[in-house]
Image (cartoon, grey):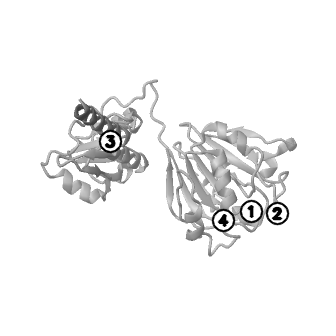
Amino acid sequence: MKKWWVTFCVMFLLLFTACSERSQVMDGDGMIQTFQYTQISQDVAKEMMEKDDGHVIVDVRREDEYAEGHIPGAILIPNESIDVDPPEELPDPNQIILVYCRSGRRSKEASQKLADMGYSNVYEFGGIIDWTGDIEINNNNETENGGEEMGAAKLLYQGHASMRITTTEGKVIYVDPFAGEGYDVPADLILMTHGHYDHTQTDTITTKNPDCETISWEEALSGGQHQSFDLGYVKVEAVEAGYNKNHDAKQCVGFILTFSNGVTLYLSGDTSTTPQMQKLAQRNLDYAFFCCDGVYNMDVQEAIECAKTVGAKHNIPYHMIPADKTNCFDQAVAESFDVPGRIILKPGEELVLE
């Protein structure tokens, strides 16, 4: 009786452990294995697709994105649907699985989740926006509500606090023009957070469309209140900024941009911790930029605390050093910005806001 009880306890413990650690699976020899996915180039992915080795190509975008165009032979398993149970479409945990999305963000998330479930041959190869091979398009590419898929805005980080955003409608937004390159695309909207020279160099923008609008800290703080501007292709909300000896909260703003596909982007502007950041946590923001030069604004440690307070899905450090057109990025500072969902953008790099 005692031997039977000991055997039962051991089996129960093994079962509990297996259920608790989804990334650890027992092999045939009774050894624990932990799997990680492998990141490969698209050229390597193409070579693997040419082999008849029983592989499967998995598109982890939304259904409407898949319908607009996908890699031939790919099956659709949206990233949001991959939870705790292995997908029915992937019954073999040892099968070679090639994963992609639009830009590479969701495919990395999905690949890690699959590896955590015990899939041992997961290969992630980025986004279809970089794919040079064949594309298969479904005839019915309308969204559920009958409209066309809106797509995603693209953000070019120019350095310091400067960036250029191109919306899905093709509208071009410049924020705090000063550093870097890429000012040759005609502007539809110019945003400026405050009046310091390293945020107001509008002359760097080569051309402006006839209906180009400018929203500076003055318009954003009209009447002493933080204003909102709905331009159709983007909604611009002014929020608090400043709160240090170099930046008066009555003459500085940050911005929250909401694009037509619902994606939100918070730009802190030049600031230290603001009282409003507690309320921003309720917005479930998608992307947030935090200044962290530690001279004229908050330092990295304070920026980390602000990022945790705001709680955006993705957090990006910017304005890492005092104004200097020739030196507007610090890798060490960027890497020390240790927060969940961190993205490090170097000047000249682009981010798809999806």
Eye-nearest disc, 2 or 3: 3
Which three-letter amino acid code belongs to the residue tagged 2? Asn
Residue at which label 2 appears: 246
- List the residue tagged with mark 4: 204
Badge 4 marks a residue whose secondary structure is: helix
Residue type at mark 1 is Asn
> Mark 4 or 3, which is nearer the eye?
3
Where does the image place residue 172, in percent across and percent down from the top left? 59, 51
Q: Label 1 to label 2, Cα distance in Å?
A: 8 Å
Q: Amino acid at mark 4?
A: Thr
Say which quarter of the image contains residue 182. Answer: bottom right
Vertical position of residue 196 compared to residue 147: above or below: below
Residue 257 visible within the image: yes
Cα gap from disc 4 to disc 1, whole angstroms:
24 Å
User: Quarter of the image holding residue 320?
Assistant: bottom right
Dot placed on the residue nearer the N-terminal end, 1 or 2: 2
Residue 160 lies, in percent from the top left, at 64, 65
